[in-house]
Amino acid sequence: MTADIIKVPDFVTMTAPEPDKPIAELAIALVAMFTDDDTLPPPRLVTLSVSGQDIDMQFGNTPDTFHAMARWAARFGGTVTGSHTDDIDGKPAVRCQVKFTYADVHVKAYAYVHTTSTR
């Protein structure tokens, strides 16, 4: 069996891959993030992923969630983005999210906010 050889251009700076953080380290980052500013609105669901090396936070589906996400974005950086979609029941919704990095861990906050608009 022959392997394809890929020539990496000289302008690409090669780095060594970062070792995966153990779940305990992700959990420590999560706790630190919540205690760093305990006035932020809490998510409904938090997922830690060793394979993804990230933290996902799901927020509620009411319009006040837009403001909750804006507070997280203002505190930790990032932009609240949204796109029209339907929820799992086929109701109109806006999927909004904020992505940022905290303690070298990628964090994504997201929500499916129910809307009265048909788009």
Image (tube, grey):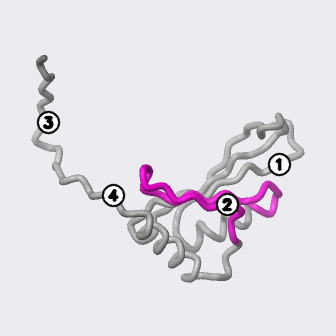
**Residue beneath disc 3:** 8
Give me the residue at 41% from left, 70% from top: 25
For mark 4, give the secondary structure: loop
Give me the residue at 80% from left, 63% from top: 64
Q: Are there few (<14), some (14-19), or many (20+) residues within 10 Å of tag 4?
A: few
**Is 40 situated left or right of 8 in this image?**
right
**Residue beneath disc 1:** 114
Give me the residue at 75% from left, 61% from top: 65
**Residue 63 drawn in magenta:** yes
Identity of the amino acid at label 3? Answer: Val
**Residue beneath disc 2:** 45
Q: Are there few (<14), some (14-19), or many (20+) residues within 10 Å of tag 3?
A: few
Q: Residue furthest right?
A: 116
Q: Earlier in the sequence, mark 2 or mark 1?
A: 2
Q: Earlier in the sequence, mark 3 or mark 4?
A: 3
Q: Residue 114 placed where, x, y %?
A: 82, 48
| Closer mark to the observer between disc 4 and disc 1 | 4
Inter-mark Cα distance, 3 to 4: 24 Å
- Asked if labels 3 and 1 touch by Cβ distance under 8 angstroms, the answer is no
| Closer mark to the observer between disc 3 and disc 4 | 4
Q: Earlier in the sequence, mark 4 or mark 1?
A: 4
- Asked if labels 1 and 2 touch by Cβ distance under 8 angstroms, the answer is no
For mark 3, give the secondary structure: loop
Q: Earlier in the sequence, mark 1 or mark 3?
A: 3
Quadrant that contains the N terminus: top left
Q: Earlier in the sequence, mark 2 or mark 4?
A: 4
Residue range corresponding to the magenta coloring: 42-65
- Asked if labels 4 and 2 touch by Cβ distance under 8 angstroms, the answer is no
Quadrant that contains the C terminus: top right
Identity of the amino acid at label 2? Answer: Leu
Inter-mark Cα distance, 4 to 1: 36 Å
